Amino acid sequence: MDLSIIIPAYNEEARLGRMLDQYLPFFNARYAASYEVLVVVNGSYDRTEDVVREYARAHKPVRVIVDPRPIGKGGAIMLGFAQAQGRLVGFVDADGATPPEAFQDLVEHIGAAGAIIASRWMPGARISVQQPFKRRLASRLFNALVRLMFGLRISDTQCGAKLLTQDAVQAILPHIGITQWAFDVDLLFQLRRAGFAITEIPTTWRDVSGSRLCVGKASADMFVAMVRLRLIYSPFRWVVALYDRTLARYVQN
């Protein structure tokens, strides 16, 4: 198996079909039976699972993974990682913001790196429909914070298209602890800790309507998750252990 494409899907019945209609003919023509699409349906209460099963019956490369819990984007991708059979394993958002040609660019440019990621902010990126200003601003501020806290010299940690080697997946999967929106930062941080080279290339991307992301809440959650991750891998990891033993249950409730 040459390629595994993981698509995390939470209440995506309205957008997922259009995305699969673009991806399946494109990758069928290039990989025939040597690729798979793993759609990980998690916590959905709409018809997302029904939509995916219809495609799986009609298209052999499509595999369905279902978890009834809302385990987050990262949790869904980790389930896909655990079952992916490809020599290269990537993931992409279900909204179709990244066209199949842009995902194929990752495959063609990974070279000897352990991972390659798409960037919307590098020179040469082509953005046909921009995000709303608040989301663009939040994304830029978040990336600046990531550089400051983790030393990751990456322009766009949150773009939804990334590709790893199977060796890299197996090396970092046991160490990833964030399953929500800051998952990408944890992924890249663990890749760097494990010594894998990370390549970044400009991508083609467009904003797609229908997102349920609350920028304010997501930003706060991501900030807390990043502080926690940074503390865990520092001399101050005792702060996290103390918090978990004392205050965590009250905050979560």
Image (cartoon, rainbow, N blue to C red):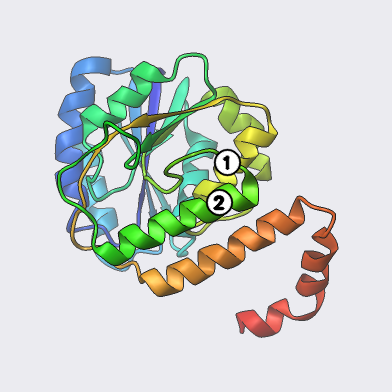
Mark 1, other Cα within 10 Å: few <14 / some 14–19 / many ≥20: some
CB-based contact (under 8 Å), mark 1 and mark 2: yes
Label at residue 193: none
Q: What type is the residue that disc 1 sits on? A: Leu
Q: Which residue is mark 2?
A: 146
**Is residue 198 toward the left or the right of residue 104 in the image?**
right
Answer yes or no: is residue 49 visible: yes
Q: Earlier in the sequence, mark 1 or mark 2?
A: 2
Is 34 situated above or below 51?
above
Is 160 situated above or below 245?
above
Label at residue 152: 1
Looking at the rendered image, the quarter that the C terminus falls into is bottom right
**Between 10 and 152, the one nearer to me in the picture:** 152
Q: What type is the residue that disc 2 sits on? A: Val
Residue 1 location, x and y as percent? Answer: 41, 18
Q: What residue is at 23 percent from the left and 16 percent from the top?
A: 30
